[in-house]
Every structure is written in C-alpha cells, then in structure tokens.
C-alpha cells in the first residue's frame, strides 16, 4: 500500500469507529474501494482495531466476498450450491472455463471467474452474477453472448 492508499484505508477504518465488531462491514468497505484486501491492508486493519492478524485473515478467508488478490476488471460468479448444480451449474462453469481459458476461482487479464455458494436465486438456476448484476437460468448460449460483449469492450 502506498501512502495515499494507507490514508484511504485509515479513513475507511475510522468510518466504522475503529470498532472490531464492525470488521465485516469494514472489509466490505475495503473491497468496494480497492477491489481486494491485501496483506498490508490486513496488517493495518489488525493494528488499527487492536486485534490479531489471524483474526482479520480468518474473516477474510471465511467469506467468499473477500479476496486477497486483485480481481479482473470484470467478475463472473457462478453459483455452485446444490439447487444450481442440479440445474446445470457444473456444465455452466465448465463452459465458462472452456470459453475463456480461465479456471473457476482464477483471474485472467480482464475477468475473474469465482465459484459462490448460493446467490439466493435458487428457483431460477443455474444462477450467476456478472459485475454485481444477477443472472438467471444461465446456460451456454447467453454465456457466449455475455463473454463476446466482454471481449468487444476489452478490444
């Protein structure tokens, strides 16, 4: 983290009154601002909240919304919970991997593909989320269209 990032990080922490019980909300603030939670950020948060780095890291690693590496410019989350798996989520994830060359849980230049475990859209599975927008009954054809539009934006 550079000096500017450190000041922004401290401002986020202060916005939650530097309270350890606000850790999850504070971490969401970091993801909203920086896109991920770096190791230096984990150290800073722990120091500012007077908790251990292990405590902060445990929360970061537990919740799927937090990542410790920078995401691609776009994020595709594919539900892997039972209802969506029954509706074709495994095939959808395999299609996404083949079409992009990016494995589930990995990041390419422009795209991160993440497994998630329930997006709350079980009746319309397989469910996914692209850049925060929910997608329902997603299969190969609409996925190809989505990824083609993404390539147009990147090119």
Image: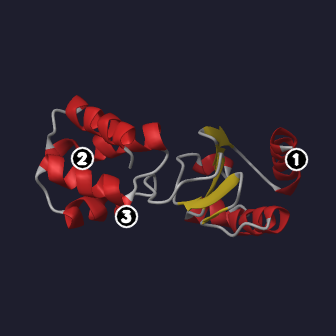
Percent across and percent down for residue 152 are: 87, 41
Going from the N terminus, do you reach mark 3 or mark 1 first? Answer: 3
Determine the residue located farthest toward the top in the rendered image.
15
Residue 127 shows in the view: yes
Residue 126 shows in the view: no
Determine the residue positioned at 29% across, 59% down: 59
Determine the residue positioned at 13% across, 56% down: 51
Determine the residue positioned at 84% across, 62% down: 99
Res. 32 image quadrant: top left
Rendered position, 53 above or below 21: below
**32 left or right, relative to 137:** left
Mark 2 to mark 3 CA distance (whole Å): 13 Å
Rendered position, 25 above or below 81: above
Going from the N terminus, do you reach mark 1 or mark 2 first? Answer: 2
**94 left or right, relative to 48:** right
Rendered position, 61 above or below 19: below
| Image marks 1 and 2: residues in contact by CB distance under 8 Å | no
Residue position for label 3: 61
- The residue closer to the viewer here, 130 or 12, is 12
| Image marks 3 and 1: residues in contact by CB distance under 8 Å | no
Question: Is disc 1 surrounded by few (<14), some (14 to 19) or many (20+) residues within 10 Å?
Answer: few
Percent across and percent down for residue 106 are: 62, 66
Mark 1 to mark 2 CA distance (whole Å): 38 Å
Going from the N terminus, do you reach mark 2 or mark 3 first? Answer: 2
- The residue closer to the viewer here, 130 or 120, is 130
Rendered position, 9 above or below 122: above
Q: Which mark is residue 148?
A: 1
The quarter of the picture where the C terminus appears is: top right
Percent across and percent down for residue 11 are: 27, 32
Residue position for label 2: 23
Res. 25 image quadrant: top left
Q: Which mark is residue 138?
A: none
């Amino acid at each position: 983290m550079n000096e500017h990032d450190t000041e922004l990080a401290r401002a986020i922490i202060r916005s939650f009154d530097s309270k350890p019980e606000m850790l999850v909300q504070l971490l969401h603030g970091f993801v909203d601002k920086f896109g991920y939670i770096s190791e230096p950020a984990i150290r800073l948060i722990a120091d500012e909240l007077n908790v251990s780095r292990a405590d902060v890291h445990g929360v970061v690693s537990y919740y799927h919304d937090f990542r410790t590496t920078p995401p691609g410019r776009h994020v595709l989350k594919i539900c892997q919970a039972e209802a969506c798996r029954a509706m074709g989520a495994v095939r959808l994830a395999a299609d996404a991997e083949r079409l992009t060359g990016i494995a589930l849980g990995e990041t390419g230049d422009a795209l991160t593909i993440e497994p998630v475990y329930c997006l709350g859209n079980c009746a319309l599975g397989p469910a996914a989320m692209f850049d925060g927008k929910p997608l329902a009954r997603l299969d190969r054809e609409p996925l190809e269209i989505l990824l083609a539009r993404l390539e147009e934006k990147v090119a």
